[in-house]
């Protein structure tokens, strides 16, 4: 291991942070507890290598990486996460600069695999994606099955319990526009999914509820991100109420 390499560890869990520091003691290490603190660390010194958790307070791993890569596109980031959620991989796919080397390794792996991933990204400048995550990537690369941003937005809205009329008002759509987005979402969730209802079982299922169940199982949504979306929804509802009272 190159003794001159620096490494920023971004991890809010104390035990995980201590574990990473012990695994990479040969590096010059700095440690932060969230993405916001890590961005501030970048402003104080030159950092080329990062290991970052995905779910963190203030700024999650994707938000942190987006800001860092915007300013320093050659920064090498190894995402170390307990989640193989499709929503995180979707978000990463949109922000990784073309010239950037990065990795994604699950926390369930052994120290040997973690070090192998780090060596590939930091020392060999090669992308390294956890084998357990590759099937999710393969599904996302199918043009007919890729859920678009607006369809994912509709999925978030129904997961928050919004009606068609509420979604239409919030997203500046017609009611028909909302229904078309949901129809497209259902079609893509049903692609290759034996557990999504077809016409034979339409009387047995609520399509909204079934879509949410499958989305949770695929990691298209999760409780952590829905909590953040709930805060955005409450802000919108409060603004709407104020506008109604002033009109």
Image (tube, helix red, strand yellow):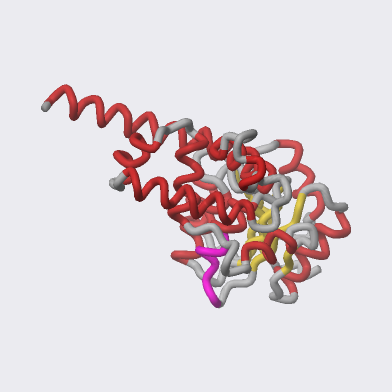
Instruction: Name the residue furthest top.
Output: 245
Horizontally, residue 2 falls left or right of residue 196, namely right
Image quadrant holding the N terminus, namely: bottom right
Compared to residue 44, the image places residue 35 above or below, namely: above
Measuring 58% from the left and 50% from the top, which residue is drawn there?
Answer: 61
Compared to residue 94, the image places residue 227 above or below, namely: above
Camera sees residue 222: no
Instruction: Name the residue furthest left.
Output: 247
Horizontally, residue 177 falls left or right of residue 132, namely left
Residue 131 is situated, as x and y percent measured from the top left of the image, at: 80, 62
Queried whether the magenta region covers residue 97, the answer comes back as yes
Queried whether the magenta region covers residue 235, the answer comes back as no
Which quadrant holds residue 234? Answer: top left
Horizontally, residue 162 falls left or right of residue 18, namely left
Please give the range of residues in magenta. 92-98
Camera sees residue 58: yes
Residue 218 is situated, as x and y percent measured from the top left of the image, at: 67, 48
Instruction: Name the residue furthest front.
Output: 200
Horizontally, residue 41 falls left or right of residue 107, namely left
Residue 141 is situated, as x and y percent measured from the top left of the image, at: 62, 68
How many marks the image carries: the answer is: 0
Which quadrant holds residue 55? Answer: top right
Residue 175 is situated, as x and y percent measured from the top left of the image, at: 33, 43
Measuring 52% from the left and 33% from the top, which residue is drawn there?
Answer: 227
Image quadrant holding the C terminus, namely: top left
Measuring 47% from the left and 47% from the top, which residue is drawn there?
Answer: 182
Measuring 74% from the left and 76% from the top, which residue is drawn there?
Answer: 124
Compared to residue 203, the image places residue 130 above or below, namely: below
């Amino acid at each position: 291991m190159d003794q001159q390499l620096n490494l920023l560890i971004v991890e809010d869990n104390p035990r995980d942070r201590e574990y990473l520091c012990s695994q990479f003691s040969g590096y010059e290490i700095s440690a932060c507890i969230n993405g916001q603190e890590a961005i501030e660390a970048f402003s104080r010194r030159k950092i080329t290598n990062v290991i970052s958790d995905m779910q963190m307070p203030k700024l999650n791993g994707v938000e942190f990486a987006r800001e860092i890569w915007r300013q320093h596109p050659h920064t090498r980031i190894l995402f170390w996460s307990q989640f193989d959620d499709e929503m995180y991989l979707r978000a990463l796919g949109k922000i990784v600069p073309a010239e950037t080397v990065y990795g994604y390794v699950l926390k369930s792996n052994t120290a040997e695999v973690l070090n192998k991933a780090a060596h590939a990204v930091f020392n060999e400048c090669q992308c390294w994606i956890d084998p357990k995550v590759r099937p999710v990537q393969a599904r996302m690369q199918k043009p007919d099955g890729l859920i678009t941003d607006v369809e994912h937005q509709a999925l978030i809205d129904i997961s928050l319990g919004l009606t068609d009329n509420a979604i239409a008002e919030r997203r500046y759509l017609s009611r028909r526009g909302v229904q078309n987005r949901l129809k497209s979402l259902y079609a893509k969730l049903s692609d290759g999914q034996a557990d999504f209802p077809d016409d034979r079982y339409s009387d047995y299922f609520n399509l909204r509820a079934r879509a949410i169940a499958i989305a949770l199982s695929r990691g298209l949504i999760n409780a952590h991100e829905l909590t953040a979306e709930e805060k955005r929804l409450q802000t919108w509802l409060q603004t709407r109420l104020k506008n109604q009272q002033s009109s």
